[in-house]
Every structure is written in structure tokens, then in C-alpha cells.
Image (cartoon, rainbow, N blue to C red):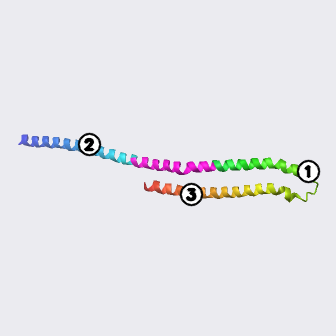
Amino acid sequence: MDQAVAEIVKNAIDLLKIIIASGMTLFAGYLGYRYGIGHLKRQKKFELIEKQLKDFYSPLIGCIKRIKAKSELRFEISKASNPAWRKICEEHPKPFLDHEKYFEPFKKAIMYDNKEFREELRFIRLMRTLSYELQISLVLKTLYL
């Protein structure tokens, strides 16, 4: 009887070894699967952020550069027209009563610059609004990803 019990215990231990080895293998596979899924989620999130950066912020940076170039041009035109207006004022007697006729080209340039500046400000406000909406959607996608 002792031999039968010993053989049952030996068989139980062998079976337990097989169960433990199989269980550890399955557990390692499960951990690898969970890690892979987490890695895939993070990769998808980074791809989404990269896509948003390419599709939205790159054109936004281009628009900002365009606005800066226009502003610099506006400053250069203003700087160049100042001596011309001073020369006209010096050539005419004081008080300069007929200045409207001479001021007309300068007035048109100022009106054009003001119109362009208002359009740029409107565009900047639009981009700022879109940027906030994009940031909110990015946060929501990140939370639910």
C-alpha cells in the first residue's frame, strides 16, 4: 500500500509539474499579449498626434510665416513712404491746405494695409479657435483610446 500511495503522490507531483509549466507558459503569453495591446494603443495614439501635427499645425506655421512676412512688408512700405510724405510737406507752404490731393496715394496704402491687417487678425482668431477645438478633440481621443 505504501508503494501505491508513493506512486500516486509521484504521479500527482508529475502532473502538478506539467500544470505549473503550462500555467506559467499561458501566463507569460497573456502578459506578452497585454504588453502588445498596450504598445499598439500607444503607437496608434502617437500616429494620431503625428497626423494632426502634419495636417494642421504645419499649414498653421506656414500661415503664421505669411502673416509675419506681410507685416514686415507693411512696415517697410510705411518706412519708405514716410520720407516721400515729408518731402511733399516741405515743398508746400505752411499751412498745407491742399494736402488731401497729395495725401490720396498714401491714404489708399494705409486703407489697404488696415484691411489686410484686419483679415490677418480674423484669420488668427479662426486658427486659435480651431487649435482649441483640435486640442480638446485630442484630449478626448487620448482619454478614450
Residue at left offset 77%, top offset 57%:
108
Q: Quadrant of the C terminus?
A: bottom left
Element under label 2?
helix
x then y, percent, for residue 3: 7, 40
What's the amino acid at mark 1? Glu
Contact check, label 3 and label 1, Cβ < 8 Å: no
| Relative to 73, residue 136 above or below | below
Tell me the crowding category of disc 1: few under 14, some 14 to 19, or many 20 or more residues within 10 angstroms, Cα based: few
Which residue is the site of mark 1?
A: 91
Q: Which of the two labelled residues, at mark 3 and mark 1, occupies the earlier sequence position?
A: 1
Q: Which of the two labelled residues, at mark 2 and mark 1, occupies the earlier sequence position?
A: 2
Q: Which of the two labelled residues, at mark 2 and mark 3, occupies the earlier sequence position?
A: 2
Element under label 1?
helix
Disc 2 to disc 3, C-alpha distance: 50 Å
Magenta stretch contains residue 89: no
**Label placed on residue 25:** 2
What's the amino acid at mark 2? Thr
Most common secondary structure along the magenta stretch: helix
Which residue is the site of mark 3?
A: 130
Tell me the crowding category of disc 2: few under 14, some 14 to 19, or many 20 or more residues within 10 angstroms, Cα based: few
Q: Nearer the viewer, residue 21 or 98?
A: 98
